[in-house]
RNA sequence: GGGGGCGUAGCUCAAUUGGUUAGAGUACCGGACUGUCGAUCCGGUGGUUGCGGGUUCGAUUCCCGUCGCCCUCGCCA
């Protein structure tokens, strides 16, 4: 961990800081941190404060590892050392893990054979002259070690102890540096940090809302924001021009490793812009954040894909660009094929695509390929055609259809060389993309091409505006209700609905969608038309978004923005599996806070005051 | 809402086909030790096997229910 610049605890008060110079430092207070002392402090008298991480007793000699946020320093308490205060040795003998102490002592350079090379402070040690106990600790429910030993349930219950562990300290520090860098970068680009309401209004569709009953409006409820979407657009109407917020968002849906009921977004919006303005700005912000927060240098520029292009090449709308292995269209080859499966799929209006896994032929046995086949079967594909490229042609399930010239043509089309493994799926386009998109990630992972220390970003633009909702049997927004269509002059959304594109874009890193935004509709007539097409009545529009629609009547500027998921970005940058490890106080997958025991019951008086009653069968 | 996994000492785990007094490491407590750095050595305390019920002569083990945690599908405009 790169230590943050430590405070100058021992710095003399500067000129003009009268109040500060009047303030006396208490004798127990630290002069340095536990990560700070080096050989250059040799022979200095210092004071350290911290937690006892470990203690080693040798009779008349005791070693303590003293820990704070900045590091660990070895303290030596020597019964026979000159200047050791009376009673100190007996005090230290009784101390144990996690006791909080102040140590007065002198910095000593260690002999060469006693240097601990694993620590930045390993060349020195603090020879104690006196030790003051600031706080005694009970034996903690689990040991505070770098390596996770306790299970997550216990760690969440005692989160304040888990947070003492270095991996979590590192996550908190880097996350804070990341957010600070983002703030600095946005501020330098003219963005205003503007707070929007936490107590706001429920809107239909979208995720379930968290609700807060109103005491003074009995029977009415606030909703916690799923995002500040409408308010940031209102900021644009207000002429604030450039808004941002590190915003907490709330969604009451079932959770996953990468989802918490409350999560943090970098939310921003800009006026008088088009896509490339937003993308350029965000790209610079992300680059600055990841560099300053995590020391990650992202290759620029981030490739920008059209949605259709991403789907065609990678089979998904969030391509992992850490490796190539694109989907290669073989439909025309397949049409002329003697292989009935290929030919048949094309005749039925389907497509055939393939992957070329470089040098993977040897790594996949018959059994390994059977597993891949089962994998794509689970994704809706009827089968997986495969071939290993040899110096003389191909072998495998489709070899007898691709002997001789047909085989040579296929190999050339796939850009393959001997030793490569070719994998094909023939089906309707949607199935092929889904199966091969996921297969690409699986095979790429098995070949070690998804290195967690490599970071590749991209943009995907021009998403479909609407998607068909099977259960509800109607069209709905693919992105959000305010995204503008690519063609502003569009008159009838009922025409060729599936192919209408919106000016929505996603930010993608290593195959994770980390942000989503769009150029918004800023003209009320068009907004009304979109709502009308989706069957949202003027009454419903009024009830839900009336104030936004009203606002546009008074001159809304063209504008657009994005929201980036902070928790996911930090987790990805740190190579953590889920986002709980980068959130100081997370909740379980049942949205329960094991430490605070929230949510909890409330008194009948509180309920009465709010004029609400619970219908729960098992209260509390 | 569906599927899967887990729950035994403070912690991490073990316990043969259902069998005798539920073990180990670690932590903790006591002792020895002046150069350790996950110190070492000796000794010790520590158990409602998540909870409730059932089958059985006998249940950590099998069955049912329930609670909690994790993963996942649905869901998250």
Image (tube, rainbow, N blue to C red):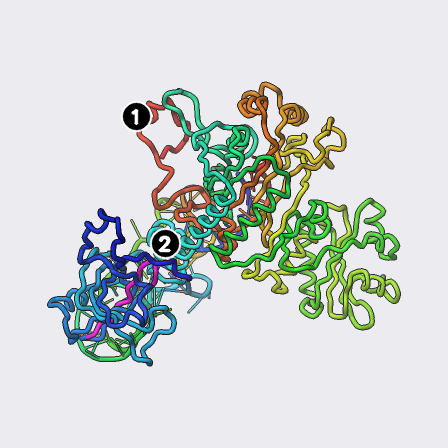
When the figure is inspected, residue A575 is found, relative to residue A45, above or below; the finding is above
Helix, strand or loop under label 1: helix
Residue in view at x 31 percent, y 71 percent: A40
Question: Is A245 covered by the magenta stretch?
Answer: no
Q: Chain of mark 1?
A: A
Q: State left or right for residue B53 relative to residue B44.
A: right
Q: Nearer the viewer, mark 2 or mark 1?
A: 2
Quadrant for the C terminus of chain A, please.
Answer: top left
Residue at label 1? A605
Query: Which label's residue is closer to the chain start, 2 or 1?
Result: 2
Within 10 Å of the Cα at label 1, are there few (<14), some (14-19), or many (20+) other Cα atoms?
Answer: few
Q: Where, by quadrant of the figure, is residue A522 drawn? A: top right
Q: Nearest the camera: A576 or A24?
A: A24
Mark number, residue A163: 2
Give, as a single range, the part of the protein colored magenta.
Answer: A61-71
Q: Chain of mark 2?
A: A
In percent of width and height, residue A298 lies at: 57, 57
Give the residue at the far top of this rendering. A539
Quadrant for the N terminus of chain A, please.
Answer: bottom left
**Residue A333 in view (yes/no):** yes
């Amino acid at each position: 961990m790169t230590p943050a610049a430590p405070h100058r605890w021992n710095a003399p008060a500067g000129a003009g800081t009268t109040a500060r110079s009047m303030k006396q430092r208490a004798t127990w207070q630290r002069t340095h941190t536990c990560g700070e002392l080096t050989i250059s402090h040799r022979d200095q008298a210092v004071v350290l404060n911290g937690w006892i991480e470990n203690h080693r007793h040798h009779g008349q000699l005791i070693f303590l590892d003293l820990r704070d946020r900045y590091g660990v320093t070895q303290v030596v308490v020597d019964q026979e050392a000159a200047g050791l205060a009376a009673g100190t040795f007996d005090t230290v003998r009784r101390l144990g893990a996690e006791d909080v102490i102040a140590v007065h002592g002198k910095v000593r350079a260690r002999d060469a054979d006693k240097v601990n090379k694993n620590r930045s402070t390993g060349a020195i040690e603090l020879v104690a002259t006196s030790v003051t106990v600031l706080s005694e600790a009970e034996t903690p429910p689990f040991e505070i070690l770098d390596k996770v030993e306790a299970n997550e349930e216990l760690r969440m219950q005692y989160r304040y102890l888990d947070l003492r562990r270095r991996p979590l300290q590192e996550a908190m520090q880097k996350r804070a540096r990341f957010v600070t860098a983002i703030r600095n970068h946005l501020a330098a680009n003219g963005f205003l940090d503007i707070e929007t309401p936490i107590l706001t209004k429920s809107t239909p569709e979208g995720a379930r809302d968290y609700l807060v009953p109103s005491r003074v409006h009995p029977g009415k409820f606030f909703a916690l924001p799923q995002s500040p979407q409408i308010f940031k657009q209102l900021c644009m109407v207000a002429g604030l021009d450039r808004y941002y917020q590190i915003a907490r968002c709330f969604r009451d849906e079932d959770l996953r490793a990468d989802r918490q009921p409350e999560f943090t977004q970098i939310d921003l919006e800009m006026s008088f812009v088009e896509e490339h303005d937003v993308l350029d700005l965000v790209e610079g912000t992300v680059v600055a954040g990841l560099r300053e927060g995590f020391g990650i240098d992202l290759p620029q520029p981030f490739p920008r894909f059209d949605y259709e292009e991403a789907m065609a090449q990678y089979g998904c709308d969030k391509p992992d660009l850490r490796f190539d292995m694109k989907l290669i269209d073989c439909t025309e080859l397949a049409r002329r094929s003697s292989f009935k499966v290929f030919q048949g799929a094309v005749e039925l209006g389907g497509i055939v695509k393939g992957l070329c896994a470089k040098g993977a032929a040897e790594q996949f046995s018959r059994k390994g390929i059977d597993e891949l086949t089962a994998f794509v079967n689970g994704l809706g594909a009827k089968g997986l055609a495969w071939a290993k490229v040899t110096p003389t042609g191909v072998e495998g399930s489709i070899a007898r259809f691709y002997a001789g010239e047909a085989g040579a043509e296929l190999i050339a089309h796939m850009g393959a060389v001997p030793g490569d493994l070719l994998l094909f799926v023939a089906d309707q386009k949607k199935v092929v993309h889904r199966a091969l998109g996921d297969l690409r990630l699986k095979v790429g992972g098995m070949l070690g091409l998804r290195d967690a220390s490599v970071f590749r970003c991209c943009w995907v633009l021009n998403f479909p505006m609407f998607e068909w909702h099977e259960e509800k049997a109607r069209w709905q927004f693919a992105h959000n209700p305010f995204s503008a269509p690519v063609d502003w002059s569009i008159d009838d959304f009922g025409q060729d609905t599936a192919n209408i594109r919106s000016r929505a874009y996603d930010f993608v890193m290593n195959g994770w969608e980390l942000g989503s935004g769009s150029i918004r509709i800023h003209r009320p007539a068009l907004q009304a038309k979109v709502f009308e097409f989706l069957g949202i009545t003027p009454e419903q529009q009024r009830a839900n978004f009336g104030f936004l629609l009203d606002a546009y009547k008074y001159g809304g500027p063209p504008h657009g923005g994005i929201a980036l998921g902070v928790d996911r970005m930090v987790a990805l940058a740190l190579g953590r599996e889920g986002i709980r490890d980068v959130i100081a106080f997370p909740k379980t997958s049942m949205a329960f806070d094991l430490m605070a025991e929230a949510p909890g019951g409330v008194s009948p008086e509180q309920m009465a005051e709010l004029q609400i009653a619970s219908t729960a069968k098992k209260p509390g």
